[in-house]
Image (tube, helix red, strand yellow):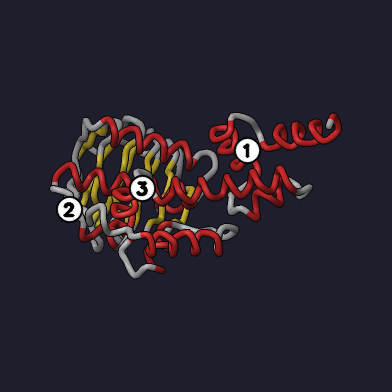
Amino acid sequence: MVPKMSGFQKPLPPESLSGTVFAGDWDIEFLPARPYEVRYRAERASIGLAVDPQMGVHAIGTDRRQAFRARVGMVGFIPAGCDVYSASDQGGDYLRLVSSSANSMAITSGESEDRNLLRMILALRAEMLSGMDPLICESLSASIASRLYSLGTAKIGPGKGWITAVRMRRVEEIIAARLGSALLVRDLATELGLSTPFFSRAFGEATGRSPQEHIIQRRLQRARDLVLTSNTSLAMIAAECGFSSQAHMTTLFGRRFGLAPGKLRKNRDFTKETA
């Protein structure tokens, strides 16, 4: 039975409810918990991730509507060209990862008990509710897609020897030149003539960390140098180092160095006065 919809007068398209980040290969949409009714044809493939339990009715690729009940971590894969209808009286927080490349991934809908996957999903929701940093969102989306793929398919990596010293120097040059811009992992991969998944796996094999972590580390190092050696405002430093905001820089700065950039500058000035 189709539940009676309440709280609105006409169907709402997905984008009318969402906060969206455009990040490399991915458009990441956060749809907050609320009553909804949507009907659309998917222009690109998408991976749907339930962040709250929810129930309602849907019809995916068919005219036949049926009840659904989704637990946290439920995965829904929608291929490009698929007709979608979905409705719920209450809804629940939901993430959609939209990408043309997702259509070629071996991802199936269903429930997952994988704790690593759930941690990444929750981390992505937290980022969409706070900093909405494209680099972090891109990395988390790619990691989620890769995890879903690897749960059902043997992952073929490029090998530890692919990132040579010459290629690593090129990566560092690109990061240094574009540190103050909205640099994404896809941009590094494109510069090297690689797909984003291949580059990310090769970089991880070679360094033990993700390209996203490496970019953030370089941003933080540059920000620390500017805090200690200049009187540039913290807001300007955040912009120059590619952070989405001063608050976002402060949060990451505290995690990395154990104190806020403002405190570090005060310590610097106090040291100068007492020297």
Q: Which residue is mark 2?
A: 156
Residue 91 appears in which quarter of the rendering?
top left
- The residue positioned 71% from the left and 32% from the top of the image is 263
**Which of label 2 and label 3 is nearer to you?**
3
Q: Earlier in the sequence, mark 2 or mark 3?
A: 2
- For label 3, the crowd category at 10 Å Cα-Cα, with few meaning under 14, some 14 to 19 and many 20 or more, is few
Please tell me which residue lies in front, 185 or 17. Answer: 185
Above-or-below relation of 248 to 44: above
* Secondary structure type for disc 3: helix
**Image quadrant occupied by the N terminus:** top left
- In the image, which disc is placed on residue 207? 3
Q: Amino acid at mark 1?
A: Thr
**Residue toward you, 15 or 134:** 134
Q: Dot 2 surroundings within 10 Å: few (below 14), some, or many (20 or more)? A: few
Distance from disc 1 to disc 3, alpha carbons, whole Å, reads: 26 Å
Disc 2 vs disc 1: Cβ atoms closer than 8 Å? no
Disc 1 designates what residue? 250
The residue sitting at 54% across, 35% down in the picture is 256
Observer-nearest of 13 and 53: 53
User: x, y percentage for residue 189?
Assistant: 37, 63
Residue 67 vertical position relative to residue 219 in the rendered view, above or below = above
Q: Could one spot residue 6 in this view of the protein?
A: no
Q: Earlier in the sequence, mark 1 or mark 3?
A: 3
Give the Cα separation between the discs numbered 2 and 1.
38 Å
Among the two numbered marks 2 and 1 on one chain, the one whose residue lies closer to the N terminus: 2
Whole-percent x, y for residue 242 in the image: 58, 54
Q: Is residue 126 left or right of residue 3?
A: right
Identified at 55% across, 60% down, the residue is 176
Element at label 2: loop
Residue 154, above or below 268 = below
Q: How far across and how far down the image is residue 161, in percent?
A: 26, 56
